[in-house]
Amino acid sequence: MGKLVAILATLDTKGPEALFLKEILSSAGLDAVIIDLGILNEPLVRPDISREDVLKELSIDPEEFLSKIRDGRLRRDEAIKLMGLGAGKILAKLVKELGGVIGIGGNQGTAASSIAMKVLPIGIPKIIVSTVASGNIRPYIEYKDIMMMFSVADLEFGPNTVSRLVLTNAANAMIGMIRGSKHLDVNKNAKRIAITTLGSTGGLTRRCVYVLKKLDFEPIVFHASGAGGSAMEDLIESGFFTAVLDLNLHELVGEVIPDDIYRPMKARLVNSLKLDIPLVVTPGSINYLVFGPPDTVPSKYLGRQTHYHNPYNTNIRLSREELLAVAEHLSNKFHSVGHKVKAKLILPLRGFSILDAPGGPLYRPDDDNEFISYVARALEGLIDISKIDANINSYEVANEVLLSFRSLINIDH
């Protein structure tokens, strides 16, 4: 692991705070470089990598950049994004010697820092100390391993009693992570299996994980919560997995109906199909929407079958029309490949989660049967399909998943 730490900050407002971080990191024997993400005013401290250097990574003339901002030809949000992209290019060049990255900021610095950090692979420590860390941080993190720390006090006007404490903790966290960190093992010969899940299909997941471990595979489970499935897709694309058990397709609902809060950031099911990785698919949790607390549910969905999962998670049953739109979307992903794929689709006939099992709050079997009929017709000849007369969380479905997995990777034990 490298000993270089990049500090990302808008130095026209956060210069003294960035310098404070650098002094702590340097005193621990790390090489720290400050990268300026400011877009307008002169930096309060001298950067190691200037705003001009950042813009040159994008072949942008710094004077023209400033001129466009001042006369309105370049919006502020676009300028901030460019600074993040330019800084990301610098981080990518430094990746072999990079031990970690710390960003500090309000909205502007947090946005630019997060854009820059997203170019880095999983495992390189990434921390953002931010005034907005107690709000909605999903857009900043997406599906990367970025740690967010609330600054408590504002990060401006020089370090104070409160901000010094928080920044010191952040610096010490970075020091500890660098000293104890290892790069992600990308051994192509490892027997790693990607699995998607949500709590509503946890029974199936647990059965599969137990058997896979007995077979000496390493199951790595991702929650199909938008970020989880997207992270999995990113790792599939890098060749990280031997096979994929895509047992929860809830994120496809978000691809069709953007109101769902679990919509993914990377297209789902694409990479395993494109790369022809052994793939087993079940339509887990594909027949309901996910929202936050009950008062966040849009009025057009009120009055439907509802499951109050916890105080911050409300599940609403899809209409038949919506469910068939998701069925079409799923089918189109397989059709886009253009040939029969090395995959198995397993369709449980008694519900796609614990929520739509007989007696469950989202039980609506006629609509689920319509989904099954549509997909079976649309994918006939493109993928091997099994229909199992049981709920997705049953032993019968788990057994079919595991038998299919063994067949696809050619093992008979």
Image (cartoon, helix red, strand yellow):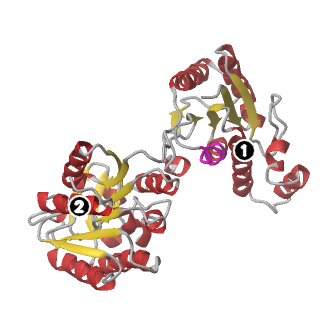
Question: Residue 140 versus residue 348: which sits nearer the camera?
Answer: 348
Q: Nearer the viewer, residue 306 or 115?
A: 115
Indicate the quadrant where residue 52 lies.
Answer: top right
Q: Please indicate, yes or no, whether residue 158 appears anywhere in the rendered image.
A: no
| Mark 1–mark 2 distance (CA, rounded to whole Å) | 44 Å
In the rendered structure, the answer to whether residue 83 lies left or right of residue 289 reads right
Q: Main secondary structure of the magenta part?
A: helix
Q: Residue 87: which numbered mark, if any?
A: 1
Q: Position of residue 321 (x, y in %)?
A: 31, 82
Report helix, strand or loop for mark 2. helix
Q: Quadrant of the N terminus?
A: top right
Up the image or down, 125 lies above or below 60; here it is above
Residue 380 visible to an observer of this rendering? yes
**Extreme residue toward the left, this view:** 359
**On screen, 73 above or below 32?**
below
Q: Is residue 214 magenta?
A: no
Residue 393 is left or right of residue 157, and the answer is left
Q: Is residue 119 magenta?
A: yes
**Residue shown at the point (71%, 26%) measured from the top left:** 32
Q: Report the disc number at residue 387.
A: none
In the rendered image of this protein, does residue 119 appear above or below residue 338? Answer: above
Q: Which residues are magenta?
A: 112-120
Residue type (three-letter) at the residue carrying disc 2: Val
In the picture, residue 404 is in which quadrant?
bottom left
Residue found at x 69% / y 36%: 8
Q: Earlier in the sequence, mark 1 or mark 2?
A: 1
Q: Left or right: 398 with respect to 84?
A: left
Q: Position of residue 181 (x, y in %)?
A: 52, 28
Which residue corresponds to mark 2? 401
Residue 242, x across and y down, in percent:
40, 53
Q: Is residue 128 left or right of residue 406?
A: right
Q: Residues within 10 Å of mark 2 (few under 14, many from 20)?
A: many
